[in-house]
Amino acid sequence: MPHHRLLRPVLAVSAVAITSLFLISLTLSDHYTVTRSITIQTSPERIFDLLETPREWRKWGAWNQRDPQMTVQYAGPERGRDAAWSWQGGRSGNGNAIITRTAKPNELHYIIRLQSTGTDAEGTFRLERGNQSTRVTWSMEGHLGDNPLYRYFGLFADRLMGPDLELSLTNLKTFTEKGK
């Protein structure tokens, strides 16, 4: 009998907590942006060639290092607009991406879809020519929709995705500077 007396307050507190979390999620943004930059001692053209060719991403992308068993398939043209790739991996999950727009050698846009969430994100690379260097800025933006759990992801997007962008950009820098 004493357990029945505790059940109602526990259920009431649980209901209030779940309702509160849901209501709070409605105030959270349904959008996230993660941005990282690096300066690379090479021309924008050299970097752009690697960015617009999906097969080259294996050489510098953090995901390939983290999930060496990941399989990648390519579709469409080898480079530039409509070049596409899809992957399946244990740690990296499954998804696909397609290059949607380029302005060689300054800008590249792509759409990425993660199957685990069914959400899309837009990736953008901006390359700014410097004095014998290039400033590369990589941004990922996404809409989280109405799912309350996904909106909480937005609070942690920078901490979750930022390190992968940083590592990938560092790898890109090492790869391109070594290959000059």
Image (cartoon, rainbow, N blue to C red):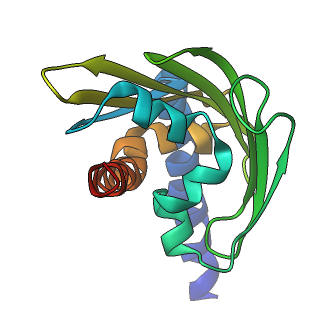
Residue 115 visible somewhere in the drawing: no
Q: Residue at x 54, y 22 (%)?
A: 108
For the N terminus, the quadrant is bottom right
Q: Relative to residue 19, is residue 24 depicted above or below?
A: above
Q: Which residue is drawn at 43% across and 16% down?
A: 106
Residue at the extreme front of the image, as rendered: 180
Left or right: where does residue 11 sit relative to residue 71?
left
Percent position of residue 42, x then y? 27, 36
Residue at the extreme left of the image, as rendered: 131
Q: Relative to residue 95, is residue 75 depicted above or below?
A: above
Q: Nearer the viewer, residue 91 or 169?
A: 169
Q: Residue at x 58, y 22 (%)?
A: 109
Question: Dividing the picture into quarters, in which one does residue 72 lie?
Answer: bottom right
Residue 170 visible somewhere in the drawing: yes
Percent position of residue 129, x then y? 26, 18
Percent position of residue 124, x then y? 50, 25
Q: Which of 77 and 99 is in front in this view?
A: 77
Q: Which of 165 and 177 is in front in this view?
A: 177
Percent position of residue 50, x then y? 52, 41
Question: Dividing the picture into quarters, in which one does residue 35 lie?
Answer: top left
Q: Nearer the viewer, residue 26 or 61?
A: 61
Q: Which residue is drawn at 35% across and 54% down?
A: 179
Q: Relative to residue 81, is residue 71 depicted above or below?
A: below
